[in-house]
């Protein structure tokens, strides 16, 4: 790593003050699991780094008629938290898949989202659950739905002088279930070739609402809206699920790279959409 | 670029050490504190050779900045056991001939110790996932599993464990 | 050279934990990067981003001006570098042309690694990018961009170390195929006639990409000079003597001015048998007058290490309906990267003479490309070769409805049968190993496994196996055995103890001399101190160094008995060594202690010589080792994911000197083999740049991807190895790619002939399969 200066603010306010001065040349660091590797290979050379580990409010995790996850909450915490596992299962599923246990104890939700890789595992569940990002800046706080949070590969709506504080996730409520699955060549220490999150809401035997979100098949995580619409108002039969899985492929615009070809990714979107819908349905009925 | 004082606990001892802002925790443990047990196998969190415990949890120390350890407790392989009082995992690894080149071993032991601390009766699958972040090229992992499984079973019989 | 000993073989055959276990589990063993040094400088290398380019200009002035930078070097600063580098080690810094992406063009030594990195950013290099040869099939064609400088010879040292099979005379290279650097041809009989008379002719092309040896410890070296011009290199190496010779040659320094200290090596597997970073680090140290340490980053290892070659084998076989073998035609293409160095003939031997083919035509071609050049990787070219022949043999058996094991046994070579070059096969356990895998319950119950699919309709189950072997490397070596004044033994070799062979050597010495194991200590000396020793590679450590230690221990024993004979006024043939004493056989109270003999050899004014056993053997006879592996797995045909449920390694080791160590070798080699089969591959783009230079995307298998590896040791003694031992390290890396391909075919009906057999390849091939 090349040399840099380090600031260690103790509060969001302190952090914002530093960002106001040094924002454009600075990078914030939480778990470092994306930032540090990028700095080590020279993809990024910030001359100024701001450590968030001394800001306790970023680590708050509250499950109480809705979920509030501070930006510095780790993947491991989300993976293990009983409240997250029961009511926000797709988010717990995705957190459990990040890296390895040594990475999950450092990697944060905020980092995963702000790094904004197309393959970010925790993004599709938040998208499917209708979450909002809470962003602090010099002009006060603002909320951005996850749907508009991502702008491009590795780019979010955050301005250089803003800080992501937390994500707010509305409680799905009863008769709702979700799931996240991804395909990777290895069981751990890997990165999604394709990831799919599904969330369904049931009412009177039919699917009242459905959300399907895809990772690693477009510059940002995307919703498969055609597939969602095919499901809404209908009973979720295996045939309908299969149809939705095919429609989900249309939302995917994958590239071919050394992790997978576009053909394979489209193939996987169908398979994983079918599987996550089946699990989501099972969980909604439970 | 001025250094800062890092105050933390390492292997149950309070330490104060001057660190550079861009030093990783791994760098600092090895170069400033002479604790060369944790190794750099990749520098990007993909191999586990740098695994230490941070407040009791296994982490990739090559990804943390040294200053991020301020006020926290760090445990390295040097603190897991002593030459005259090996940790049961260390003893089992010796007796069962687990280590070959040895480079991955400190990281594996730290990860395995964390598995058993969180889950005293892990299944084979849970052990495998618990050390899946530790790459080993020499052993094929089988003897590690035997040793870790044996230690877990032995603590049922009332052996003491850290 | 038969290993006969009347010694009680107590010690040999025991499962004894390695004595360095405690130091390793305590994290106290020091590797190169752990060695402290006052005034240490840190080295970094600037590497070419282009696979083929002319260096127009290098400006290092800004880098030199950065505070904390102590030296910045280009090739112009090292006048002793040969204009045309004959080997990779000689290409210390590129002089006027780079031939692979990642080739070093400048070197920096600085107070801190971070400053060295910043200095690299400040070095300005002007390149004229040139056309590249990346695909070996294109690189072979006339008119392809040339890789080698004219006049550089093929480097066949590796081939010689691994195989006693002579390289056959080759055809003259076709005109203007400038990148063909080695060729071989082996022929017998009339293959055209053989194919014409066959009922089943199969032709396939098998491909395995370049793979990295994957050692956890990256290349590392610490260099320091003293004021008299003596260089010391602390190196992570598999051969300190080899490193010394290479550094001496590259830098034109006499060998006795260099001391190479073999520091504990964090894995090598053939990737550390050649010098790589030592010369440049030595020069940086000389120029700065300070100790300099260079540790490769993982990214550098993947981009610019010395991987295994890419292998493409076109294999055509003809057989009769009843399974009679008729003809085999093969062409093996080895992509050696930018410098020659592959082992061509191994492939021919195992393609054409593991089974008895009456007619064969086997050609080997080594091609140069603009990629990092290769070194060895545990049984070089054998896994890829077996992938081809064992996949093909399985397809033949299946197509003809023959039993897989019986078909192979019927045609398997035996001792005395000729290899492709006419040399006879030495004694080997191929038959025993194959029979043993055929008798395994997992093989016998394979049909039930296939039928027992779970509830998930997309999962298929299968079982497959493959047989492979290794001829065993040879290299002259030496060892000494000393009797200490307290009656203990000190054994000295220069052998880098990577595979835990030191404990086996101790067991051999103890058994041969007649002492308890705890009285024997093995020391690995540096190149100033130790007698010349070969590489810790080629599965030859126990076979060659073990022989040297055995003979040196026997020599020491004879000397001891001669000294005792004079004292006891008895004949040496009537003496025994028991419980630390030399006694007259049958008369236990007539004896002297070993300690007294040891003391007398070191006593002031004594006329008794110290006991120093010496042995310095060279070898001509190999002891082939065979291994078979069986995989039992499940395939999710929707996603292509493979779950390996069971994996068995059966291996003939001749005599397991230390079964605990042997098991570890079998399991470790198997997992490397499985990595090659399932997930590993260095992927280059069309410009010769590596697209997966991290361990995230260069996928080695984790503990979560694997089951327990079952090991079954077979012992068919070799007439020439110590106590009958054969080399152990290489055979277990060989069979898995073929075993996996066979198991996946068993499960899905899909035959994959390209490694890694990834989920993508399986899923897309399955989806494309015509439904039955």
Image: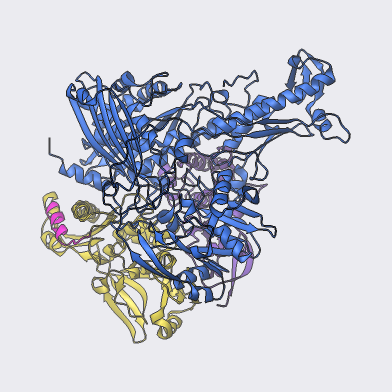
Residue A245 magenta? yes
Residue furthest to the right in view is C605
Q: Which residues are magenta?
A: A242-255
Q: Is residue B118 visible?
A: no
Residue B29, image x and y in percent? Answer: 58, 62
Q: Is residue C308 above or below residue C317?
A: below
Out of C10 and B69, give the one closest to the viewer.
C10
Left or right placement of residue C462 versus residue C229 in this view:
left
Q: Image point 38% across, 26% down: which residue?
A: C421
Left or right placement of residue C215 versus residue C610 in this view:
left
Majority secondary structure of magenta residues: helix
Which hue belongs to chain C? Answer: blue
Q: Image point 76% across, 34% down: which residue?
A: C484
The quadrant in which residue C731 appears is top left
Residue C726, image x and y in percent? Answer: 51, 28
Q: Quadrant of the N terminus of chain C?
A: top right
Which hue belongs to chain B? Answer: purple
Q: How many marks?
A: 0
Residue A118 magenta? no
Residue C419, image x and y in percent? Answer: 38, 25
Residue furthest to the top in view is C586
Left or right placement of residue A207 versus residue C623 in this view:
left
Q: Image point 66% across, 57% down: which residue?
A: C229
Out of A285 and B46, give the one closest to the viewer.
B46
Among the chains pictured, the one given yellow colouring is A
Out of A281 and C630, give the one closest to the viewer.
C630
């Amino acid at each position: 790593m090349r040399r840099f200066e380090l600031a260690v603010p103790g509060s969001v306010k302190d952090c914002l003050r530093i960002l106001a001065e040094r924002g454009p040349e600075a990078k914030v660091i939480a778990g470092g699991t994306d930032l540090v590797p990028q700095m080590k290979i020279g993809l990024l050379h910030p001359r100024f780094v701001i450590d968030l580990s001394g800001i306790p409010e970023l680590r708050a995790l509250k499950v109480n008629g809705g979920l509030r996850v501070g930006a510095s909450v780790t993947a491991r915490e989300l993976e293990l938290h009983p409240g997250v596992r029961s009511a926000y299962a797709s988010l717990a599923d995705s957190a459990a898949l990040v890296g390895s246990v040594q990475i999950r104890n450092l990697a944060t939700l905020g980092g995963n989202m702000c790094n904004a890789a197309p393959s970010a595992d925790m993004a599709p569940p938040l998208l499917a659950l209708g979450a909002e990002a809470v962003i602090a800046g010099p002009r006060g706080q603002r909320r951005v739905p996850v749907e508009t949070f991502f702008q491009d590969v590795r780019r979010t709506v955050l301005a250089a002088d803003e800080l992501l504080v937390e994500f707010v996730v509305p409680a799905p409520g009863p008769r709702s279930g979700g799931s996240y699955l991804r395909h990777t060549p290895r069981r751990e220490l890997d990165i999604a070739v394709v990831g799919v999150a599904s969330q369904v809401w049931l009412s009177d035997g039919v699917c009242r609402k459905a959300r399907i979100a895809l990772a690693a098949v477009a510059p940002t995580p995307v919703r498969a809206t055609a597939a969602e619409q095919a499901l809404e108002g209908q009973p979720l039969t295996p045939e309908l699920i299969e149809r939705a899985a095919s429609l989900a492929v249309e939302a995917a615009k994958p590239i071919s790279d050394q992790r997978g070809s576009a053909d394979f990714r489209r193939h996987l979107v169908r398979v994983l959409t079918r599987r996550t819908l089946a699990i989501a349905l099972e969980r909604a009925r439970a | 670029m001025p250094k800062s004082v890092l105050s933390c606990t390492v292997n149950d001892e309070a330490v104060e050490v001057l660190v550079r802002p861009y030093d990783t925790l791994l760098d600092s443990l090895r170069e400033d504190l002479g604790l060369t047990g944790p190794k750099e196998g990749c520098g990007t969190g993909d191999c586990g050779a740098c695994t230490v415990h941070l407040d009791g949890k296994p982490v990739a120390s090559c990804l943390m900045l040294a200053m991020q350890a301020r006020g926290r407790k760090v445990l390295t392989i040097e603190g897991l056991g002593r030459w005259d009082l090996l940790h049961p995992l260390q003893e089992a690894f010796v007796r069962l001939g687990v280590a070959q080149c040895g480079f991955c071993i400190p990281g594996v032991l730290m990860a395995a110790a964390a598995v058993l601390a969180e889950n005293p009766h892990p299944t084979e699958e849970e052990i495998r996932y618990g050390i899946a972040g530790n790459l080993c090229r020499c052993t094929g992992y089988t003897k590690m599993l035997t040793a870790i499984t044996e230690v877990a079973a032995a603590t049922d019989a009332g052996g003491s464990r850290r | 050279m038969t290993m006969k000993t009347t010694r009680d073989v107590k010690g040999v055959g025991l499962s004894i934990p390695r004595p360095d276990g405690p130091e390793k589990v305590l994290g106290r063993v020091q590797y190169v990067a752990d060695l402290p040094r006052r005034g240490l400088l840190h080295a970094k290398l600037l590497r070419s981003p282009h696979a083929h380019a002319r260096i127009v200009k290098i400006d290092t002035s800004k880098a030199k001006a950065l505070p904390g930078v102590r030296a910045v070097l280009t090739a112009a600063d090292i006048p002793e570098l040969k204009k045309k580098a004959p080997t990779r080690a000689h290409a210390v810094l590129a002089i006027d042309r780079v031939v692979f992406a990642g080739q070093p063009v400048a070197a920096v030594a600085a107070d801190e690694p971070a400053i060295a990195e910043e200095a690299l950013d400040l070095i300005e290099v002007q390149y004229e990018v040139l056309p590249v040869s990346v695909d070996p099939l294109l690189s072979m064609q006339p008119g392809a961009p040339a890789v080698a400088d004219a006049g550089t010879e093929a480097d066949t040292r590796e081939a010689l170390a691994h195989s006693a099979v002579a390289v056959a005379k080759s055809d003259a290279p076709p005109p203007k195929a400038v990148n063909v650097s080695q060729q071989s041809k082996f022929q017998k009989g009339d293959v055209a006639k053989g194919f014409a008379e066959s009922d089943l002719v199969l032709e396939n092309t098998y491909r395995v990409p370049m793979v990295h040896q994957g050692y956890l410890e990256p290349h590392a070296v610490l260099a320091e000079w003293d004021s008299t011009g003596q260089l010391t290199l602390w190196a992570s190496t598999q051969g300190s003597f080899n490193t010394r010779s290479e550094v001496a040659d590259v830098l034109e320094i006499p060998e006795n001015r260099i001391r190479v200290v073999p520091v504990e090596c964090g894995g090598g597997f053939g990737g550390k048998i050649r010098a790589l970073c030592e010369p440049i680090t030595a020069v940086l140290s000389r120029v700065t007058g300070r100790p300099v340490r260079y540790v490769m980053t993982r990214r550098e290892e993947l981009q610019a290490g010395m991987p295994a070659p890419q292998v493409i084998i076109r294999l055509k076989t003809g057989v009769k309906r009843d399974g009679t073998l008729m003809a085999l035609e093969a062409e093996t293409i080895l992509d050696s990267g930018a410098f020659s160095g592959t082992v061509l003939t191994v492939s021919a031997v195992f393609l054409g003479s593991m089974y008895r083919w009456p007619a064969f035509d086997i050609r080997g071609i080594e091609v140069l490309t603009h990629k990092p050049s290769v070194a060895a990787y545990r049984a070089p070219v054998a896994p890829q070769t077996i992938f081809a022949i064992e996949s093909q043999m399985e397809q033949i058996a299946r197509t003809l409805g023959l039993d897989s094991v019986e078909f192979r046994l019927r045609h398997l070579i035996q001792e005395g049968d000729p290899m492709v070059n006419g040399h006879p096969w030495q004694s080997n356990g191929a038959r025993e190993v194959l029979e043993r895998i055929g008798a395994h319950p997992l093989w016998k119950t394979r049909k039930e496994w296939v039928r027992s699919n779970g509830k998930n309709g997309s999962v298929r189950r299968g079982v497959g196996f493959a047989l492979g072997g290794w001829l065993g490397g040879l290299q002259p070596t030496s060892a000494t055995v000393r009797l200490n004044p307290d009656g203990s033994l000190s054994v000295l070799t220069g052998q880098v103890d990577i595979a835990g062979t030191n404990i086996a050597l101790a067991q051999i010495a103890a058994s041969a001399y007649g002492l308890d194991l705890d009285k024997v200590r093995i020391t690995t000396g540096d190149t100033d101190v130790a007698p010349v020793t070969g590489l810790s590679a080629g599965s030859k450590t126990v076979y060659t160094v073990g022989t040297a230690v055995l003979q040196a221990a026997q020599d020491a024993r004879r000397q001891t008995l001669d000294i005792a004979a004079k004292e006891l006024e008895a004949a040496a043939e009537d003496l025994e060594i028991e419980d630390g004493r030399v006694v007259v056989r049958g008369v236990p109270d007539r004896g002297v202690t070993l300690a007294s003999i040891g003391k007398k050899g070191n006593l002031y004014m004594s006329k008794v010589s110290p006991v120093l056993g010496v042995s310095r053997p060279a070898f001509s006879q190999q002891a082939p080792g065979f291994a078979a592996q069986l995989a039992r797995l499940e395939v999710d045909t929707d996603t292509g994911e493979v779950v390996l449920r069971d994996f068995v390694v059966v291996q003939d080791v001749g005599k397991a000197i230390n079964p605990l160590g042997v098991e570890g070798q079998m399991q470790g080699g198997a997992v490397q083999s499985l990595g090659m089969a399932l997930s590993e591959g260095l992927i280059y783009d069309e410009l010769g740049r590596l697209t997966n230079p991290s361990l995230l995307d260069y996928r080695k298998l984790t503990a979560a991807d694997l089951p327990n590896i079952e090991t079954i040791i077979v012992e068919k003694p070799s007439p020439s190895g110590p106590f009958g031992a054969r080399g152990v390290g290489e055979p277990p890396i060989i069979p898995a790619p073929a075993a996996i391909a066979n198991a996946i075919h068993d499960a899905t009906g899909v035959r994959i002939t390209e490694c890694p057999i990834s989920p993508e390849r399986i899923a897309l091939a399955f989806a494309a399969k015509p439904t039955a």
